[in-house]
């Protein structure tokens, strides 16, 4: 049996040509797959960070609410008229929601609000921007009595149908029960807590 050296050389030549590199089509396919994976991971990252900021907003409002509750329950007020009121009734004017940051440095017969909440949290995206945390107190016959409060923030998450119904129900209960004016709440605010 004789071996054909020409056949052997042609097989080696074909084999070495196939290892020379990728074709243009193969390279474009790999690049497009990498691009798709990168865009999917970027979407997941931005979604996770916005959910994290929303969680912080909810946590901040809970902390502010605890400060409001501590001030309400204070038994160290200089006059009995000051007891049983939430902070900020001297800051509010009319039917307007006020930024919680306006409570910095305020003091009444029960002491400074900073005694109850040392650091007032700020929105993680824009500390003093258009979506700062807001508060409002209840009114009785058109006069702010400070016996109930609401805190609000704007979440980045889009509300689903059930959450929109809960928000509408909270607005109705607040307005009908305590004369609180939630109609003045900016349209973009979509998370409310209070008592």
Image (spheres, rainbow, N blue to C red):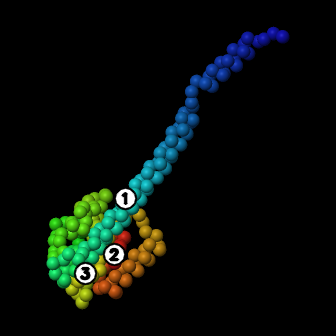
What residue is disc 1 on? 53
**Foreground: disc 2 or disc 3:** 3
- Find numbered disc 3 in the image and state the secondary structure of the residue it sits on: loop
Measure the C-alpha gap from mark 3 to mark 1. 33 Å
- Label 1, residues with CA under 10 Å away: few <14, some 14-19, many ≥20: some
Question: 25 or 102, which is in the foreground?
Answer: 102
Q: Is residue 92 visible?
A: no
Residue 43: image x %, image y %?
45, 52
Question: 139 or 13, which is in the foreground?
Answer: 139
Q: Earlier in the sequence, mark 3 or mark 1?
A: 1
Query: Can you say which quadrant of the picture contains the N terminus?
Result: top right
Residue 121: image x %, image y %?
28, 62
Q: Residue at x 16, y 81 (%)?
A: 79
Q: Give the label on residue 84, or none.
A: 3
Left or right of 13 on screen, residue 162: left
Residue 175: image x %, image y %?
33, 84
- Find numbered disc 2 in the image and state the secondary structure of the residue it sits on: strand
Q: Residue at x 57, y 27 (%)?
A: 21
Asked if disc 2 and disc 3 are in contact, CB closer than 8 Å, the reply is no
Q: Earlier in the sequence, mark 2 or mark 1?
A: 1
Q: Earlier in the sequence, mark 2 or mark 3?
A: 3
What residue is disc 2 on? 194
Residue 4 lies in what quarter of the image? top right
Q: Residue furthest right?
A: 1
Q: Residue furthest front?
A: 76
């Amino acid at each position: 049996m004789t071996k054909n050296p020409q056949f052997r050389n042609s097989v080696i030549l074909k084999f070495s040509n196939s290892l020379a590199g990728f074709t243009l089509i193969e390279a474009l396919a790999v690049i497009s797959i990498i691009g798709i994976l990168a865009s999917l991971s970027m979407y997941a990252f931005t979604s996770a960070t916005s959910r994290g900021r929303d969680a912080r907003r909810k946590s901040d409002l809970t902390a502010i609410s605890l400060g409001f509750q501590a001030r309400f329950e204070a038994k160290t007020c200089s006059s009995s008229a000051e007891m049983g009121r939430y902070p900020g009734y001297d800051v509010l004017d009319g039917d307007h929601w006020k930024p919680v940051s306006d409570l910095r440095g305020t003091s009444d017969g029960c002491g400074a609000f900073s005694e109850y909440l040392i650091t007032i949290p700020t929105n993680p995206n824009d500390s003093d921007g258009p979506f700062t945390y807001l508060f409002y107190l209840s009114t009785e016959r058109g006069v702010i009595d400070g016996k109930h409060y609401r805190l609000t923030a704007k979440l980045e998450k889009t509300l689903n149908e059930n959450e929109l119904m809960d928000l509408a129900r909270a607005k109705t209960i607040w307005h009908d029960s305590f004369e609180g004016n939630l109609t003045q709440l900016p349209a973009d605010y979509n998370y409310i807590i209070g008592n």
